[in-house]
Amino acid sequence: MTKINLITGFLGSGKTTTLRHLLAQKPEGEKWAVLVNEFGEVGIDGALLADSGAVLKEIPGGCMCCVNGLPMQVGLNMLLQQSKPDRLLIEPTGLGHPKQILSLLSSEVYSNWLTLNASLCLLDARNLSDQRTVENENFRDQLAAADVVVANKSDTYSEQDYQALAAWQNQWAGEREVIITSNGTVDTALLDRPRLNLAQLPDGAHHHAQASTRGLAALSLPGNQRWRRALNQADGYSSCGWIFDADTVFDTIDILEWARLAPVDRVKGVVRIKEGTLLVNRQGQDLQIETRPGDPLDSRIELITRDEAQWNVLQSSLLKIRLG
């Protein structure tokens, strides 16, 4: 039986950082796998988790529970049959609805294969003061479906944020534990808690412009093409992602300024710079960067926003800061 946990959370709540922290605590001798789904098409999280020691499979381009759950089932079946992991962590997109995923995982067809353990939901309490986020059905239902709520990024909270979190906890948490932490620091013991929150959730209403036609493959570069981009749109959000070949090098200062000033809600990237590999993660005005030695296989950048974006303008400025 593979133990399985759902790690949910709205855009920018710190799901990938939490996954990296959990994977770093993997017991020796156990095989862990990660099934990750992103709203964008280029597969940033796969690059971020590439050195985690876990078996990884990506489902890009929107909610994995769409198209009657087929992408989810295919990815899940491939991991179970080929890797036979002791534990599987599933990270849906921050714009995904949890009901269909939980229903599939708890269905009879997987009863002899999976043990569904506690679902964790990452919450950035600063979002509780953002009415547009609070009114988003995916945001609400992710929290409603969780067995444990992890109030992440607490090092950035104001007193108002703590008050909003306390008010939410009093009204909605019930008997569920709310853990306050930062940088995705959670104990792996949470993963062995049983799935207890069996509340009936409403069906999610998805409004995708079109379903991804590439199935389980993240964006790649054909032939000698140096770069390409891909767009996605759903549920009032839109994304634009770029992938550049391994020979493309970005100026470090310029790419950081580009990421900092881009008029969007979310920026994620793994790019090649002269010094090696640069990881960029921006939610709102919070910009986190990390450098690693060695060159990435390619450079990948993803932007997500609720408002209108001038993708061609942003692309022109991005192309100008390439060194090679």
Image: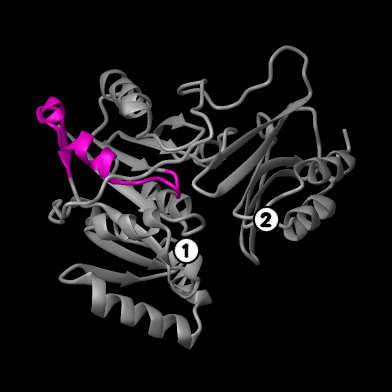
Location of the C terminus (image quadrant): top right
**What residue is shown at x 51% (from left), y 57% (from top)?**
12
Q: Which residue is drawn at the image coordinates 28% and 70% (left, top)?
A: 178
Of mark 1 and mark 2, the one earlier in the sequence is 1
Which region of the structure is painted magenta?
93-116
Residue 43 in the image: above or below residue 172: above
Residue 16 shows which numbered tag? none
Q: Nearer the viewer, residue 147 or 233?
A: 233
Instruction: Residue 172: say if magenta.
Output: no
Residue linked to disc 2 = 264
Q: Quadrant of residue 221?
A: top right
Q: SS at mark 1?
A: helix
Left or right: 113 as drawn, with respect to 65: left
Looking at the image, residue 139 lies above or below residue 125: above
In percent of the image, x 81 and y 37: which residue is there?
A: 249
> Amino acid under label 2?
Val
Residue nearest the observer in this picture, 82 or 170: 170
Residue 195 at what x, y percent from top left?
15, 51
Q: Residues within 10 Å of mark 2 (few under 14, many from 20)?
A: many
Q: Quadrant of residue 139?
A: bottom left
Left or right of residue 296: residue 207: left
Specify the amino acid type for callout 1. Answer: Thr
Task: Specify the label residue 133 is tagged with.
Answer: 1
Q: Position of residue 19 (x, y in %)?
A: 41, 49
Point out residue 71 in the picture as x, y percentages from the top left corner. 38, 25
In this view, the residue farthest toward the top is 223
Q: Position of residue 126 (x, y in %)?
A: 48, 73
> How busy is the neighbourhood of tag 1: few (under 14 within 10 Å), some, or many (20 plus)?
some
- As for residue 106 lying within the magenta part, the answer is yes
Q: Mark 1 or mark 2: which is in front? A: 1
Q: Residue at x 35, y 35 (%)?
A: 65
